[in-house]
Amino acid sequence: MITLITFIIILGLLIFVHELGHFVAAKKSGIKVDEFGFGYPPRIIGTYKDPKTKKFVLVLPKRGKGKKQLAAVAGQESEENFPATVYSLNWLPLGGFCKMKGENGDGKSDPDSFSAKKAWQRIIVLIAGVAMNFVLATLVLMIGFKVGLPTAIDSQNKSYAKDQKVQIMSIATDSPAEKVGLKIGDQIVSINDKKLENVTQVQKVIDKNKGKEIDLKIKRYNENLDVKVEPRKNPPEDQGAMGVGLVETGIVSYPFFTSIWKGITATFNLTIAILVGFYDIFKNLFAGNKIGADVAGPIGIAVMTGQVSKMGFSYLLQFVALLSINLAIINALPIPAIDGGRILFIIIEKIRRKPISMRIENYIHTIGFAILILLMVVVTFRDVFKFKDIFINLWNKII
């Protein structure tokens, strides 16, 4: 239950911040926002400020169908006639939405319509959501670097680090480590009951015990494990005896002003790393090769949220920043139905010097949305099978 609540809060925050970017940019551009909602309908309650009386008017849950929905105690029969933005609280707590006037291509003759604005203004409104996700990631990392974030230890940050440990950062295919079930992120606490403090000590002990079975004490999240493994005498040239890449990590906390700069640079570095990852995925996809990266859907992200939550607050901050940057990059891609796709149509409009038929554009966006939903369903089913043991255990607990 805690995992589910944490997942809903994180996902809600990421989407709400994204929509908040659209909202602020639309208001600054003189576009009327019909409704800005926290969560998704059905509506619990809402309000708007009447421009004449300067008083807030209560908006009740919708009743009826179509344009004759009775929605406000002010006597309005249709929400299309509301004179100001409705701010609503809705039942599904998964983010929010920003409903702008004319975002579907109508109202081109109205100066406060999205479709009536200049191309550069529409692009700014669309890109604002992406920008806000980058801002959120930067702020979260700034806070994280102040309170302490898990970081690889080097000579420059060692003086700021605490809780130092040796962790596995990579595992070679068909290596002894893979065969005994070691995982990336596992902490090596001791070997043959000898506590080890750095990578050099771990490597020396492994090298001395090539061809011999050794006892590893591993810490995975909050779980302590005992693992037996036999380091190879003659490993491949690009691998070690056990087939793992090791890194010394710790919780690194910086002074206030240093943490601000670290948050900015970390956001930039993570963005570059994720872009490279997306490039590899698309390159392998079009080349017909196996996709090396592991793609997760909502269920996979929920499971990862639970795992990261067990590791501590600092790890959760890093995870939120990573998700926020991922969401920003995905929304910026020139794919129909998302922000990047809509920006692409605006650019094409400027090149052609006339807009694409609204019917054709909506048709393409609909197809794009359907493909995205299909992809999400496929990934979700794969996540269900991948994490089936978790769901079986959960079901057994319920029973």
Image: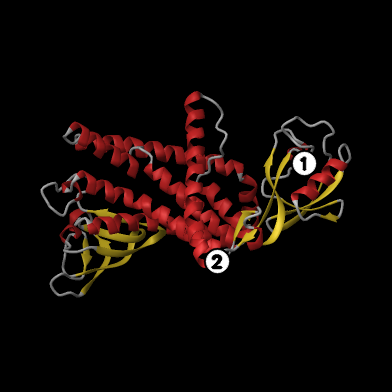
Q: Mark 1 is on which residue type?
A: Val
Question: In the figure, is residue 5 to the left or right of 127?
Answer: right
Q: Which residue is mark 2?
A: 255
Q: Residue at x 71, y 32 (%)?
A: 238
Residue 169 lies in what quarter of the image? top right
- Corner quadrant of residue 349: top left
Mark 1 neighbour class, 10 Å CA radius: few under 14, some 14 to 19, many 20 or more: few
- Which quadrant of the figure has residue 17? bottom left
- Establish if 85 lies above or below 266: below
Q: Can I make out residue 11 in this image?
A: no
The image position of residue 294, as x and y in percent, is 56, 39
Residue 218 visible: yes
Q: Position of residue 119 (x, y in %)?
A: 21, 44
**Helix, strand or loop status at disc 1:** loop
Q: How is the image coloured?
A: secondary structure
Q: Which mark is residue 180?
A: 1
Nearest-to-viewer mark from 2 and 1: 2
The amino acid type found where label 2 is placed reads Pro
**Residue at (17% x, 74% y) in the render:** 54
| Residue in front for this viewpoint, 338 or 71 | 338
For the C terminus, the quadrant is: bottom right
- Of residues 34 and 80, the one drawn nearer to the viewer in this rendering: 34
Q: Residue at x 27, y 56 (%)?
A: 25
Marks 2 and 1, how far apart at CA: 41 Å
Viewer-side residue, 362 vs 218 = 218
- Where is residue 344? Give x, y as percent: 29, 37
Q: Secondary structure at mark 2?
A: loop
Q: Which mark is residue 271?
A: none
Instruction: State the residue in front, 179 or 39.
Output: 179
